Structures are given as structure tokens and as C-alpha cells.
Image (cartoon, coloured by chain):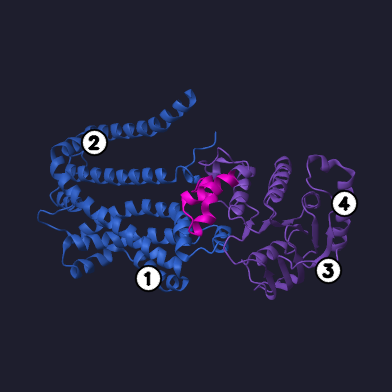
Amino acid sequence: MADVAAEPAPLLALHGVTKTFRNGTVALRPIDLAVMTGGFVSLLGPSGCGKSTLLRIIAGLVPPSTGTVERRGDGRTGEIGFVFQEPTLMPWANVWDNIHLPLRLAGVGRGAAAARIADVIAAVGLGGFERVYPRELSGGMRMRVSIARAIVTEPQLLLLDEPFAALDEITRFKLNEDLLRLWQLRRCTILFVTHSVFESVFLSNRIVIMTRRPGRVAGDLAVDLPYPRDEALRTSVDYSERCRDVSRRLAEASQ
Amino acid sequence: MNSRWRDRVGRVAAPVAIGLLMLLGWEVLVRVEEIPPYVLPGPLLVARTLWTDGPSLLGSLWQTLRITLSALIAAIVLGGMLAILFAQSRLLERCLFPYAVILQVTPIVSIAPLIIIWVNDTFLALLVCAWIVAFFPIVANTTLGLNSADRNLVALFRLYGASPWQVLRLLRMPSALPFFLAGVRISGGLALIGAVVAEFVAGTGGDETGLASRILEAGYRLEIPRLFAALLLLSLTGIAIFAVLSWITHRLLAHWHESALPQDE
């Protein structure tokens, strides 16, 4: 751990965030979390541990019951990108129009948005699919559209809520690598919710482990594997050792 | 390819064959039993009557059609606007929806005389009657559609600071389109029924008579073949309205909605 005093202010800081739903279910016990600029942080925990709720609180979609969320930024819309578990596309709009949505909502017309949309379409590998409707795309391709839509506003913080959970393994591995490439290219900060130990170790440089409901932070560890990471890493000894570590910590947290 | 063609032929040919068989049976029955035309005319006689009385019946059809289409358009405009209002405010929906239901469940036959007394202009009175019958499916369906937008998409719109107008225009209205169109398709048929029922009650004479009055008139005079011809014309109109609305629905939804997708092989 580096000297705390020397660290710059975090991009995102949660102070004592809790969430109790109206029906009385306690989803989150007090959570303190600071995320530095440029990090790739995974929130790892069993299903129903409140990690999705936490992500929604950070996005400002759900208010916390107590506690505060501080985020550095100039307050423009589109500073946060969000990718849901499902692709969440508008079925009546084609790929291009779906990606245009965040810019359109901010009043950026088709002409002015064209260059940026072409840019992200190329970045996620959707070239040639601009006029295609979501129903004609595979699950992996739909998720690519969803990611392109989230990064088209050039967010400083990208929140992903188990985006690849519903995909087959081959597609998931491919998208993992592509997401890493995007992250390195765009230098945004990523908060990635997952219940997969392997996915969290492969992607992130920091893993925050959460307990089952009511969720709280049970562990916070760095993953010191170098980037760029690729397919070869998945079979390396380093990788499996980290996975074993994280699995153990997760098992302890779940008890 | 071959099997698909055979499939299509089967789909059209089977009901047509049944229909022809029934018409044949009807004609044979009428002839063998020597049923007089004022009790039950054979299909050939009905067809001949339709041909000879066609021009005058078509004039009446135009009257009925004018009321039907005007009522449908009014139902679409007012029903759609009411649904949008409901979608904006749950309170408003809670306050007004019961009255829409009351209007819907009260048989039009029982309120039509009142409306005809209250509204001086006959065309307008009939229009109001047909509208009352037609507007509910549009209100109910569109309200449901506007409220069934994907929750995550709603969240996404909020994340990007969308205005209520943007949420309505870019998210809720497209989400509601299939529901709205299903409502319009039901309302098309109901508007025709409403127009006919209102005409029956009004029993309008003079030169602005719709098909319903012609049916009544033919019944009084025991001109049963003409009654059948008018009835046939009415059914064909209903079918045509449904077909046109179905076609429009398909065109509007073809590229994205599940209901318009081709069947899996």
C-alpha cells in the first residue's frame, strides 16, 4: 500500500452508505469505499449481496438510506456510463440510434454525433452493423451495443452490473479482453460487478469482496498481474494462484 | 419452397373450401325444402340482390362508414391523449379511469336514446355513440403500454438527465405502440358495431340513412334478400377495416416487434 497522505483525492468515495428497502429488507450495511481514477475495480460477491444495489446508488439511480456518495466531476450528464445485466436496448431502434441515445438526450444531433458514434462502433467491433435491429443480433453483439452506448459520452466512470453473466463462456472471454482493451485505450475508471472469481481476477487490479445480504465489504485486495492481459493469462500459474486466494477470501466472507 | 407454397395454399384453400361447401348446402337446402325467400333467401338470390341493389346500398354504406371512421379517428386522438395524461399522473388515472370503465360497461343501446335527444345533429349523435364504444380499448391498451416501458431503460433515461417529454416521446410512446395498435384494431370493429347500434336506435329516415336503417327497413317490408345483402356488406366492411388495420400494424412493427416476426421453422 502506498503512503495514504501522498494519494490524490479519490474519484469516488462512499461514506457509510446503507440501504434498507421499503419492505424492511436490509440490503447494505455501512459501506465505505474509495475508488481512484483509472482503476479497474471489481465488486465480487454472491448473488443477492446488494452489489447491484450499490452500483445503482453510485449511479444515482437509487438513493442511499444513509451515508453519502461523493464523486469528483464537473456534473455534466454522461459522466457516468452504466451497463446493465441485460443489454437493455430499444428494440424499435437500430444499432446506430441505440448508441446515439445518450447524446440525443443531451441535445447532440445526428450530424454532430456521427463521428463519435462511428468511433465507438469501431472500438467495440460493430462496424457494418449500424442499421441492424437488436433482435437480429446475438447476445454478445447486443452487449457490445450496450457497452458502446455507455462509452459514447466518454464517461469518467463506467459502471457494469454483471454484464456478461448471461453469455456463453467463449463470448464472455472475448468480451473480457475487449473490455480490457477499451479500458486501457480510454483511460476511464471501471467499477465492475460480478459473482465470478475468475472474471474478477482476469479483469481488475482491485477486488472488493462483499458478504451475502446484508452486504458489507469483507475484503479489499489488489491484483498485481501486469496488463495487458490476454488469453494466455487464463492458463498461467500466477492467475490460478490469485483465483485460489480470492476464492478462499470469498468463502470466508460467505460464512 | 415447395412446402411453403403448399402451406400457404392450405391456409387459404381450406377455409374457402369450407365456405363454398356451406354456401352450396345452404342453396340446396333452400331449393329442396322450397323455403320462401322472405324466410331464408338462398345465397345466389342474395348475390343477385346485392348486384341490383348495390348502388343504393353503397350510398348507405358510405353513411355508416363515415360515422365509423370519424368515431375511430376521434377514439384514436382522444383515447391516445387520455392515455398519455394517465401515464403522466397516477392520480389522474386513479380519478378518471373508473369513469372510463363505467362508460364502457354501460350498454350503448341504453344510452344511445339519451345521446340522440341531447345532441341535435344526427351525424354527431351517432358519432358520439360509436366513439363511446370504440375509445375504451385504445385508452386501456395505450395506458398499459405507456406504463410497461423497460424499467432499466427508464433508469438509463434518468441517468442521462432526460426530460419528461423525452421519456414520453423516445421511450414510453414507442414502447406503447404495439399495445396502442392492438387497441386500434379492436376499436375499428367496435366503432362499426357502435355506429350500427346507434343507427338502429336512432332509426333515421330521410336521405342520410346508414346501412343499419336499411336493414331495419328491409326487415319491416319482408325484403329479406336485401336484408341479407346489407348484412353481407356490413360484414365485408368489418373485415376490410380489420384487414387494413392489421396491415398497418404489421408495417409499423415489422422490423422490431415479436408479434410481427415470422414463425420459427
Q: Amino acid at mark 3?
A: Val
- Work out whether mark 4 precedes mark 3 in sequence or the reverse, and give the earlier one: 3
Mark 3 and mark 2 in contact? Answer it, CB < 8 Å: no
Q: Which disc is residue B263 wearing?
A: none
Q: Marks 1 and 3, Cα distance to the nearest angstrom?
A: 66 Å
In percent of the image, x 44 and y 51: which residue is there?
A: B178
Quadrant, the C terminus of chain A: bottom right
Q: Which residue is mark 1?
A: B99
Point out which mark residue A242 bears: 4
Which residue bears the numbered disc 2?
Answer: B43
Chain ID, mark 1: B
Q: Residues within 10 Å of mark 3 (few under 14, many from 20)?
A: few
Which chain is the one coloured blue?
A: B
- Left or right: A45 as drawn, with respect to A109: right
Residue B180 figure quarter: bottom left
Identify the hue of chain A: purple
Q: Quadrant of residue B134?
A: bottom left
Question: Which residue is painted at 20% across and 48% down in the image?
Answer: B61
Name the element at disc 4: helix
Residue that mark 3 sits on? A4
- From the viewer's side, name the closer residue of A87 and A120: A120
Q: What residue do we see at 80% from left, 57% from top? A: A206
What is the span of residues highlighted in magenta in the rendered image?
Answer: A92-121
The label nearer to you, 3 versus 2, is 3
